[in-house]
Amino acid sequence: MWVQCHKLFNNLLHSGTVGERTPGVRNVDVEVDLPAELSRKAEEQHNDLSRITFIIFNDTTQFEDVNDTNLLNGNVLEVIVGNSSIQNLTEYMNLTINHNEKMLNNCSHRCVSLSENEDDNITGHWDSAGCKTTVRDNQTICQCNHLSYFAVLLKNTLDENVLISLMYISQIGCGISAIFSAVTIILYCAFRKIKSDQVTKIHMNLCAALFLLNINFLTNVWLSTVRNDGFCKTIAVCLHYSLLCTFTWMGIEAFQLYLMLIKVFNTYISHYIQKLALIGWGIPAVVVFVCIGADKDNYGLFVTEIQDKNNTASMCWITNKVVHYVTNCGYFSVICFGNTAMLIIACAKLMHLQRGSTTEQGSVWKDLWTVLGLCCLLGTAWALVFFSFGPLYVTQIYLFSIFNSLHGFFIFFWYCVLKRPSKEELSFTTTWKNEVKVELPVLHSPF
């Protein structure tokens, strides 16, 4: 690679005129075409045109922004003439990078250069200003009006057909989930005089959070077309708040499961539901207010690029990557870890009770429904987001959209399956290893 590029530049230098394509140079990894205008620009700046620097950096740790970015071939390319920067060319410098294979279908290419200030000092910030990107199968062509350090950033994108189908799946699923979440709450309000305990109230708060999340998402898609910055920020804040509330109430479900499984004896906590409500609805509000206080521009119009298209899809959401990773990915990671641990403990308890039970085989199906119900309550399907990468990226995105957009429906279905009309089945007794009997309602018990 180095020899080919070096040979190309030597041929350019000895051809006598910058901008002439050198015959006989083929199949190089990187090809640079310098415009004829460069000769005049170099003379104006008293630059030495005979000294053209072209370096390929395989080690990109010295570039500040590179560590958080995927680069084409993992390289940064330097194209410099003389000892000063050349800017504002009317004819483009063409930088052609050949790939051995076609790039992944879910990646977009964007040509960028390291920005410079008025004193020609590198600021360490990648900027696409002054560069155009063209992708042709196994080639990426950067056309730039200046010379500097260049790279091609790779970003995950979705095909237009995939994005449209995911949008329809999400909208339909969220609509169904919102309806059944509301129905679940209505059923609870209608029958709460008959049976209403703390566990049921926690379920209803989770349903309320899911209802708000689904409604905010559905209205976001439509209201984001208004293109009003202040209005868009408000919508994004509401969506972020409802998402954090959903995560928090899933964590509270795990905490309640801990009290029921680990602390078998009744644990009295004064104003228990009120305290949980303060946590479930209050902590997300604090997080959102901190984000707004740090920078109100953390929320706004979020644009998603569509692969091989000039179109984009947009919604009102978080615009700062750090805020997204900390408040969403980091926040959920902690909750997901705790919920997964509680799910494993619950399954272990079920297996232990099943081995010591002499009941009919039908109890196995009941246990299966219990585990599936716990998966819904604890939001384990949200963990699919951690596997949305690599060759199965699109498949995981589809699964994530289907399962999580129907979250409210699954909870409603589980609620109805475990509900028993007969009075004898409104409660049952579970005998633990230490022979302590604990009466738990079938509708709400994990077992």
Image (cartoon, rainbow, N blue to C red):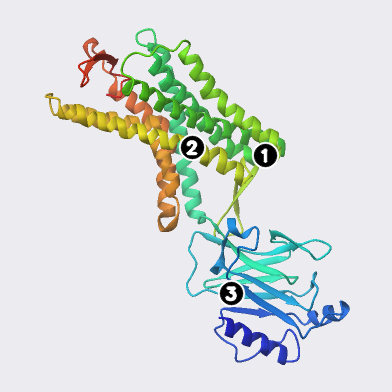
Q: Quadrant of residue 413?
A: top left
Image quadrant containing the C terminus: top left
Residue that badge 1 annotates: 226
Q: Amino acid at mark 3?
A: Ile
In primary-sequence order, the first of circles 3 and 2 is 3
Q: Which residue is mark 3?
A: 97
Seen at 32% across and 15% down, the residue is: 265
Which one is in front in this view, the residue at disc 2 or the one at disc 1? 2
Residue 78 location, x and y as percent? 68, 73
Work out how far the residue at label 3 is from the one at label 1, CA to CA, in angstroms: 40 Å
For numbered disc 3, what is the local secondary structure? Answer: strand
Q: Position of residue 341 (x, y in %)?
A: 36, 35
From what the image shows, is residue 266 above or below residue 225? above
Nearer-the-camera pick, 100 or 92? 100
**Residue indicated by mark 2:** 332
- The nearer-to-camera label among 3 and 2 is 2
